[in-house]
Image (cartoon, rainbow, N blue to C red):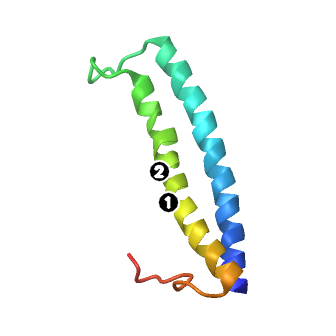
Amino acid sequence: RSKAAVLLLADLLCLAFLAVFVYQGTIVAKRVLMLGQFSPSMPWLPIGVTYAAIPVGCFFMFCNVVVYAARHLRTAMTGKGEEVYNPHEI
């Protein structure tokens, strides 16, 4: 249970960090899109689209950490559940 609680705390800190990246990354991507700049090597690609990779990637990481946090929460609360951390799970 204590291992699951520590991992849950780490998950919550990671979620806060990723939420800031999603929020601030979206602001930066919008501002760059408003500038109307295009890539020099690919004139059809706005630079803001490449900047949007950071909030989009962080959003998907956020979703993944939510799944792990739910698993850790269940294990911390009940003491039962799947293995808290299995490095061979992937």
Secondary-structure class at tag 2: helix
Marks 1 and 2, Cα distance to the nearest angstrom? 6 Å
Q: Give the residue displayed 51% in from the left and 20% down from the top.
A: 32
Tag 1–tag 2 contact (CB < 8 Å):
yes
Residue 85 in the image, given as x and y percentages of width and height: 54, 81
Left or right, residue 9 beside residue 67:
right
Q: Which residue is mark 1?
A: 64
Residue drawn at point x = 46 percent, y = 46 percent: 57
Q: Position of residue 29 (x, y in %)?
A: 52, 27
Q: Please state which amino acid type lies under the numbered disc 2.
A: Phe
Name the secondary structure under disc 1. helix
Q: In this rendered view, identify the residue nearer to me: 17 or 39.
A: 17
Q: Which mark is residue 60?
A: 2
The crowding category of the residue bearing disc 2, from other C-alpha atoms within 10 Å (few below 14, some 14 to 19, many at least 20), is: few
Query: Relative to 53, does residue 62 appear above or below in the rendering?
Result: below
Residue 26: image quadrant is: top right
